[in-house]
Image: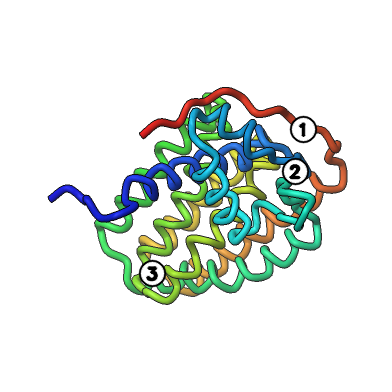
Amino acid sequence: MTDLTLGAAHRTLRDKVTKELRRRILSGELAQGERLVEDRLAAALGVSRNPVRESIRVLAAEGFIEVVPRLGATVARLSAEEGEELFDVRMAIEGLAARLAARKHTPEAVARLRHVLEQAKAAVESGRLEEVADLNTAFHLAVGEAAGNSYLALMMTPMLQRAQWVFSQTAAVRGPHSWQEHLSLCEAIEAGDEDEAQARAVAHVAAARRSFLAAASRKPKTGKRLGNTQVTT
């Protein structure tokens, strides 16, 4: 049955705009600290101002955008301190997810993990960095699904969206290493080794932390302007 509830089509457009703006922030097309002008964004995306305004609210709640009264919206800056806080949480949550995934592993769950790994390997080898970042998130989400814990799943999605922003800063360097670390984690999950799966997950996050902090210490403060991608209903 077609969804004809009041506002459904508008929500769909808002969701599309939100997804596109999030993608541009993650990829760096919208640079950290860049001012977001609703009229310009609406024109570039081929939509009215309303879905853009609503998308900015959504992304502000997720931490990707900062809104200051009377000054407007800008892309948030991801500081080294915020990255450290995120990695602390990731170590705890992803270590637990890996342990539970190993405890409850099934052939279907392992097959999903290996499918993502195959896609990631191909993306790394061909240098498709944006796709590598997407697949990195997809792998961690698949581990969360394999854990089979509904409370854990609620926490992992927003956390991993933020983590993808961090990963995108270092994808060129981290991509090959991350794929190998994921493969090692998948093997521990498939073997049902809870302790080893948790240890490998924590080691993986620790390696990502070191890479991010190294990049943050040398990152130039430059940005890119918004392109002309069209978002339509």
Question: How busy is the neighbourhood of tag 2: few (under 14 within 10 Å), some, or many (20 plus)?
Answer: many
Image spot of residue 22 (x, y percent): 56, 44
Q: Position of residue 41 (x, y in %)?
A: 60, 34
Residue 151 appears left or right of 49: left
Answer whether labels 3 and 1 touch (C-beta < 8 Å): no
The residue labelled by disc 2 is: 32
Picture coordinates of residue 38, whole percent (x, y): 63, 39
Judge from the rendering whether residue 126 lies leftward or rightward of residue 34; answer left or right: left
At x 61% / y 42%, what residue is drawn? 26
Q: Amino acid at mark 1?
A: Gly
- Helix, strand or loop for disc 1: loop
| Label 3 – label 1 distance at C-alpha | 38 Å
Label 1 close to label 2 by CB (< 8 Å): yes
The residue that disc 1 covers is: 223
Whether residues under marks 2 and 3 lie with C-beta atoms below 8 angstroms apart, the answer is: no
**What residue sits right under mark 3 in the picture?**
147
Which residue shows up at 31% across the image and 51% down it?
A: 8
How far separated are the C-alphas under marks 2 and 3?
Answer: 34 Å
